[in-house]
Image (cartoon, grey):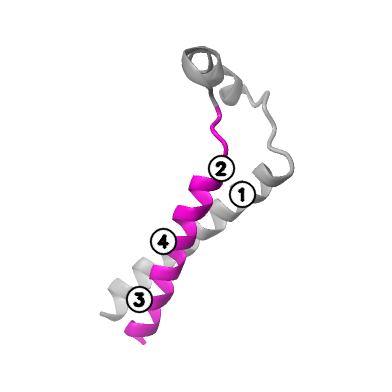
């Protein structure tokens, strides 16, 4: 059981890293650092298309990573 969960955790971790690296940056350069924070804070930029899919995949994989980590700690 622990071996199966560990292998599943490694697959989820590699998938999570891949999905995060595939996401586009929210700000570009110094001007994005100044104005980009305010836009993302007030929700002016909405994710669409592939960015939305990657965002949802990141959320799902991170929750799955957390659950798998807790279950490995419980069963070990």
Quadrant where the C terminus is found in the figure: bottom left
Q: Is residue 13 magenta?
A: yes
The answer to whether 4 appears left or right of 18 in the picture is: left
Q: Nearer the viewer, mark 1 or mark 4?
A: 1
The earlier-in-sequence mark between 2 and 3 is: 3
- The Cα atoms of the two marked residues, 3 and 1, are separated by 24 Å
| Location of residue 74 in the rendering, given as x and y in whole percent from the top left corner | 30, 75
Range drawn in magenta: 1-26
Give residue 72's mark: none
Mark with earlier residue (4, 2): 2
From what the image shows, is residue 56 above or below residue 15? Answer: above
Q: Check whether the beta carbons of the residues at disc 2 and disc 1 lie within 8 A of each other.
A: yes
Which residue in the structure is indicated by mark 4? 66
Task: Indicate which disc residue 23 carries.
Answer: 2
Q: Position of residue 30 (x, y in %)?
A: 46, 14
The vertical placement of 16 against 30, above or below, is below
Q: Which mark is residue 6?
A: 3
Considering the whole magenta stretch, tell me its main secondary structure: helix
Q: Nearer the viewer, mark 4 or mark 3?
A: 3
Q: At x 56% / y 24%, what residue is drawn?
A: 41
């Amino acid at each position: 059981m622990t071996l199966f969960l560990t292998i599943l955790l490694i697959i989820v971790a590699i998938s999570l890293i891949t999905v995060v690296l595939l996401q586009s940056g929210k700000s570009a350069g110094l001007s994005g650092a100044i104005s980009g924070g305010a836009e993302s804070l007030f929700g002016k930029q909405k994710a669409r298309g592939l960015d939305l899919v990657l965002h949802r995949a990141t959320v799902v994989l991170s929750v799955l990573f957390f659950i798998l980590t807790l279950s490995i700690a419980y069963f070990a």
